[in-house]
Image (tube, grey):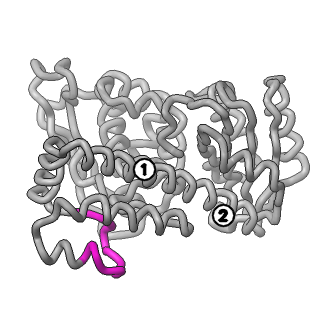
Amino acid sequence: MTVKELFLSVGFDNVINALRNTHRTCRSIKSVASYKEAFDSICLIEFEGAGGEVSFDVTPREEWFEPHSLPLLAHNVEGDFWKNTVGKTVVKPDDNPFTDAELAGAILWGMTFYGFTRHTGWTPREERYTLYGEQAEKLKRRLYLPYIRDNREKRKLMSNEELPFGIAFSMEIWNRIHYCEKHQNRAKRKRYYRLKKRIALLNRLDKRQHLIDTIHEKSGFYDQQLENRIMKASTINETWRDSHVADLSSRINYLEDLLMNYFPTLHDIFDGGEELLIVAYTSDATPLAVEEEHHLRSMIQSFDKKQPITFIKKVDNEAKADIALQFIIISKTPINDDKND
């Protein structure tokens, strides 16, 4: 049985229930909507690649309930292309104590280690988008330069050359940097603190300006007052929901089910923000139909929220046959120490 055949045979609801048991110590399983999107996306992928086998590492039963312990891990799934992994053969453990849903859950958990969708991929390199990002990187180089003793590393930091993995060091150098942080005098601590705060601010502005630039580029939508509110907000939370269906006629129903029944739901997305911007992306080939737009607007308005809501349509051919919804929540006060901002 291949990975895709296993997924199709057990279904998502059984898989997420199994994950809540076997991977209950992992915080990521709270985001059910993300796992559902990944699962449904994987089930639509056609096998392409060399294939291989998926095996499992089973933890001794007496360690299953220890903190940070996982009863089983799937091998040969992390870091590979999904289009190859879907065709790999599932090799069940000897004397297998797990259900098919639990095995599928371990595979899904491993396959999503680097992100659930194209919007949530993880990379070790911090992306830069605007002049704010470039300024942040220059300050980062200044931040670490006093603690570097290796002349080659110093020359790289002092140059303007692009670093292939961003600002990254060996563990030996990082350990020295952390050691020096703890043994700074008052003047150096204040300098370090000021630079860190400035870098964090520039990184936030970089992401926000990139957000505004993308809206301009794909929709031609301009609202100077809204843009000022985005740039000056205390918190900007951004989240995505995509349809993942083979039948285009059901994509709006898929989104409604996802937004109403899988946490974080539309209600959770609305909660806490003072203003909401919703952007619907579709490709040139499969534009947002009038009926689909009416359905979306009706669903959003049904919550009868007091926050002002702006709805925009964009063209993005990377969406292919999907409707991709981008939710941008604007708040004057911090919301859950927003990691996306």
Q: Residue at x 21, y 49 (%)?
A: 75
Is residue 158 part of the magenta span, yes or no? yes
Question: What amino acid type should be assigned to the residue bearing mark 1?
Answer: Gly
Residue 320 image label = 2
Q: Residue at x 56, y 30 (%)?
A: 335
Quarter of the figure with residue 60: top left
Name the spot of residue 122 as percent of width and height, x first. Answer: 40, 54
Chain part drawn in magenta: 156-168
Q: Would residue 263 be counted in the magenta stretch?
A: no
Q: Is residue 68 left or right of residue 99?
A: left
Instruction: Give the residue at mark 1.
Output: 115
Report if the CB atoms under discs 2 and 1 are less than 8 Å apart: no
| Residue 9 x %, y % | 44, 39
Q: Amino acid at mark 2?
A: Lys
Give the image location of residue 6, x and y in percent.
38, 43
The image quadrant of residue 169 is bottom left
SS label for mark 1 = loop
Can see residue 260?
A: no
